[in-house]
Image (cartoon, rainbow, N blue to C red):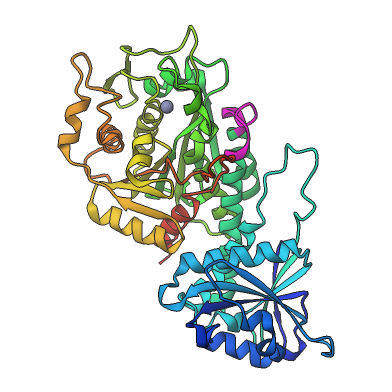
Amino acid sequence: MNVVCEIAPAEKWQADVLVLFVYSGEEETRPEPYAGLEKVMAEAVPWLAGSPAFADFEAAKASTSVAYAPEAIDGGIKRVVLAGLGPQAKCDGYCLREAASAALAKCRSLKCVRAALPLDVLDGLPLEQGKALEEVVFAGLQSGYTYEELKSEKDKKVGFPEELVVLGKADPDQAIHTALKQAQAAHAGVALCKDLVNAPPNVADADYMAEAAKDMADQYGFAIEVMDKDQVKEMGMGAFYAVAQGSDGPANLIVLKTKAAIQDNAKPLAVVGKGVTFDTGGISLKPASAMSSMKADMAGAAAVLGLFKALGELGVDIPVLGVVPCTDNMPSGKAFRPEDVVTTLSGKTVEITNTDAEGRLLLCDGLTYAQRFDPSLVVDLATLTGACVIALGNHVAAAFGTSEELAAELRELGDQQGERYWPMPLWDMFFEGLKSPVADMQNSGPREGGAIVAAMFLKQFVEDGVDWLHLDIAGPEVTNKKGGASMATGFGVRTLLALAREKYMQ
Ligand SMILES: [Zn+2]
């Protein structure tokens, strides 16, 4: 879907369908009017007020209704998709995104070619106009995302609407252009992340991830380095290598840098993503039922690549370093086993007590590597623990940080992007369960507080004075439709992008 901006007086607007947002009011005032809606109705679709589809629309959150102009009307807009926001008092950015997504899905099912969104209708929504536009356009673009590559028959509605036209009456200011650019860049990043996660594990292996990163480096001028399994071993990443050694498939450490990150004294934002392209559990084999959606165990890595895609599309050069260790975790005669002791890149030793706690073994070496570049902040993202899902459910990620302020800021930033994080504690007592009689620590501890124990493990590899955030995204990285297939959400990309922008652009 192309997004374009058109300037014309309201009576000259042309589109297959106009998208409008509506609050549900009390029964007698339903649908509840607000400034933007009233303005657009008066100027562009005066017939709408008399339409039963409007008068009867209850405007429940993310519901839609289609109103048609009486036949006698000449020219102008003849069809309106109304999207419900629910009650005004409860409406927030999440409601707006859902409504926008539902509206564009409706336009798609109607096979509209040109769907139009008047800027004026954003006046009176819970977000200020520029941010509201960014969120509506982002959600609209995302609603058209599909993963159809491997289907022999494609969905015929894919590709509709061909165009989303943002309609204004006067030349929009810079904030509007910026909002549109940001929405499209975020969409490109999230879509890439989804594509990588949705791709099956026999396709999206560590080499596939490296190719995706190389393509981006070519396209946007990023610096890239890819170290294969032997090089990872040689470099001394004994923890990462231990996971990779059991697989006949590839393993790669992918390192991406923006141009600004190569400069002296760049102090980049370093982002480390867990890239376990399929997790069988290794010798500590998972039961079959626990292996579904394990292709998504690289969602952290995919989010890092999604961030670079979004940065490239945005065309801003801010110092960002991506460190992406990728491998699958397989049982074999060469596989690492419980009671092995491995030496990490940091020099610290780890006794393996569970080969299914492999993500932290990739991450600890990734974290050590990232800190060599003197970052201003290190963030890791990982589908790390089932315990996190038990604690916070399927829609919320855990945020751990070297300071409570950092985690609180991240939560706020995520919320503004439609991604929910909840701060979790990192008290030293959680290390007790990781003590090993033969090594510096174990890789796996007690079940209780498992998400925190995993974070505590990672903390051992964060040097004093380094600001660090650990985001456990097990849960929100895929949709969890009961009885249906899990599909990627692209979770994390937008928060990382917002973090990068906030750190270096304001
Ligand atoms: Zn695992």
Q: Residue furthest front?
A: 27
Give the percent coordinates (x, y) of residue 405: 25, 56
Q: Quadrant of the N terminus?
A: bottom right
Give the percent coordinates (x, y) of residue 310: 56, 54
Observer-nearest of 135 and 294: 294
> In the image, what residue occupies the spot 66% across and 65% down?
104
> In the image, what residue occupies the spot 53% across and 65% down?
97
Can I make out residue 255 in this image?
no
Write down which quadrant ligand 1 falls in. top left
Q: Which segment is the magenta one? A: 197-208
How many numbered dots are placed on residues in this image?
A: 0
Can I make out residue 86 in this image?
yes
Tell me: 66 left or right of 368.
right
Question: Looking at the picture, does residue 383 appear above or below residue 505?
Answer: above
Give the percent coordinates (x, y) of residue 423: 29, 51
Question: Looking at the picture, does residue 357 appear above or below residue 31?
Answer: above
Observer-nearest of 182 and 225: 182
Tell me: 87 left or right of 465.
right
> In the image, what residue occupies the spot 77% across and 56% down?
157
Corner quadrant of residue 48: bottom right
Tell me: 291 left or right of 40.
left
**Residue 33 within the magenta-colored segment of the rendering:** no
**Residue 202 within the magenta-colored segment of the rendering:** yes
Observer-nearest of 354 and 227: 354
Q: Quadrant of the C terminus?
A: bottom left
Give the percent coordinates (x, y) of residue 456: 25, 35
> In the image, what residue occupies the spot 61% across and 64% down?
102
Corner quadrant of residue 466: top left
